[in-house]
Amino acid sequence: MSSLSRRNLMKVTAATAVAPGAAHAHGKTTYDLTVLGTSDMHGNVYNWDYFKDAEYDDAAHNDVGVAKLAALVNRIRGERRGRATLVLDAGDTIQGTPLAYYYAVQEPITSTGRTHPMAKAMNVLRYDAVTLGNHEFNYGLPLLATWIGQLGFPALAANAVNAKTGKPAFAPYVIKRVSLGPGAPVLRVGILGLTNPGTAIWDRAHVEGKLVFADLVETANRWVPEMKRKGADIVIVSAHSGDSGTSSYGPELPVENAAGLVATKVPDIDAVLFGHAHVEIAQKFYTNEVTGKQVLTSEPSKWGQRLTRMDFTLTRERGKWAVSQARSATLNTNTVDADPVVLAAVREQHRTTVAYVNQVVATSTGELSAAASRYRDTPIIDFINHVQTETVTAALGTALPVLSIAAPFSRTAVFPAGDVKIRDVAGLYVFDNTLEAVELTGAEVRAYLEYSAKYFVTLAPGAPVDPATISDPAVPDYNYDILSGVGYDIDIARPAGSRITRLTHPDGTAVADTDRFVVAVNNYRRSGGGNFPGITRAQVYNEQKEIRQLLIDWAQAKGTIDPADFFTPNWRLVRDGVPVF
């Protein structure tokens, strides 16, 4: 454990404000504590869409960003007039917007020594602790360590263990001393941080051999008793792990979403703030199987759109504190104006990022849209696959055919006719993935396509087709892959698992099971994301080149984006051999 982590582990700070008094109920003196929670902010400080270069808006008129959250937090702190209030975050903080990307890659804080915009914003808001999310590891451990060193509060991850020493790599928990009023005994709030074990898969290149990610329930069962021995009166878990269900990534990660399991399996936990799934759960109670106690849980959506508010009523008997009541709600950040202090702290970096994403990289001969890419072969997805194929071919000089895989990440991405800017490319390829390649046989390519084709619902010949409902809502767009370099049909009248009715080489000959291919793929998929078959194997190519930057570089080098240079229609949806579109 680093010296910083040791300091954070032992850090005990007093709440800055004092409650004006206690209440009395049924002959007992009661006190109150409010805990405010955020999660999955993903690099959002301003209420700004860098891909559109405009104020953020969506169909529900949500707002985003730390500045909006800070305004709500400050309002609640003011309303409580100094009564005990803690603020926590459940992770996925430093990745997700061009703002976060710019200060991790273009002008990395590890080289410049500048403070990361998310550290600036969160320090202004005055968090009490943050849990590390899986995306905190995307840019490597040195950048993560630099960011943690810039925070004015602890960064927690009890289940991230040093692979060599077996000791915690980060602070597992912090115990906060909270004043509940003049003459009242001090309340010691233990905050345990749990990160997602999927990091071992998704960021294997950064963490393999360095960190081990232990099971969340096992880890909580280890640390909660220690926190109680060290004096924690109540325990709150901040977990970067979804509510319940097991995993969307298969047997390599059996328990990805374990917040509910932690609440039910581990005694002496009073509440769980959680994130990772990007959903809003205002209030949900679990019954602990050991104690029978009700455990409050809540998830505050994503990107700063919501703030969780947990309110606890506390009593003290025979020298021990107890939670007599607990409730929570989620508050919408579109109800407040952005906090001007947060905006000012990050204004220069925001403007730098806006200037960066508005750089012109090429001229497009016509408008290219991703709107129909899920169900039609479109030039804009072929643009990704062409660049990936060209990059791998040039690096390997292989005699084997090179195929490429890309997913339709965005339904709104557009290259306009005329000037194409960095933000247009970033809007198409929204993840900071790197390019890798593996070898697959023809049989493995077919199995891969069959797995991908489960994305579509089954539609009988002649049944009406609505693009809005053609896909299974349980399968996200980023877990549907489109392959270039071979021709194939997906028959959506057939059941999943038997839908690839045509699989051919470019010359029309059938792909044999024993044929061999090099397949270009992003690091997320190759490391097991989505649990696609056959792809998690040793790479034949891995130069750690970011795909988004490869797309930008290609466009800049060519100067013109012309579908004639890369568009090769090679797949289609059919029903009994008849094209759907």
Image: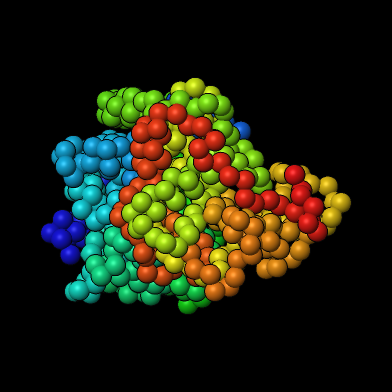
Q: Is residue 578 left or right of residue 489?
A: right
In which image quadrant can residue 444 be found?
bottom right
Residue that extends furthest to the top in the rendered view of this protein: 418
Q: Is residue 191 visible?
A: no
Q: Is residue 544 left or right of residue 64?
A: left
Above or below, 356 relative to 4: above
Q: Is residue 277 left or right of residue 504?
A: left
Q: Name which residue lies at 27% across and 25% down.
A: 348
Residue that extends furthest to the right in the rendered view of this protein: 462
Q: Is residue 396 visible?
A: yes
Residue that extends furthest to the left in the rendered view of this protein: 3
The x, y position of residue 56, in whole percent, is: 49, 30
Q: Name which residue lies at 33% across and 24% down.
A: 355
Of the 4 image quadrants, the one containing the N terminus is bottom left
The x, y position of residue 54, in whole percent, is: 47, 24
Q: Name which residue lies at 76% across and 48% down.
A: 580
- In the image, 417 versus 531, the foreground residue is 417
- In the image, 242 versus 52, the foreground residue is 52
Q: Is residue 329 left or right of residue 39?
A: right
In which image quadrant can residue 210 be found?
bottom left
In which image quadrant can residue 350 be found?
top left
Q: Name which residue lies at 54% across and 61% down.
A: 285
Of the 4 image quadrants, the one containing the C terminus is top right
The x, y position of residue 497, in whole percent, is: 67, 68
Above or below, 445 relative to 365: below
The x, y position of residue 128, in whole percent, is: 29, 48
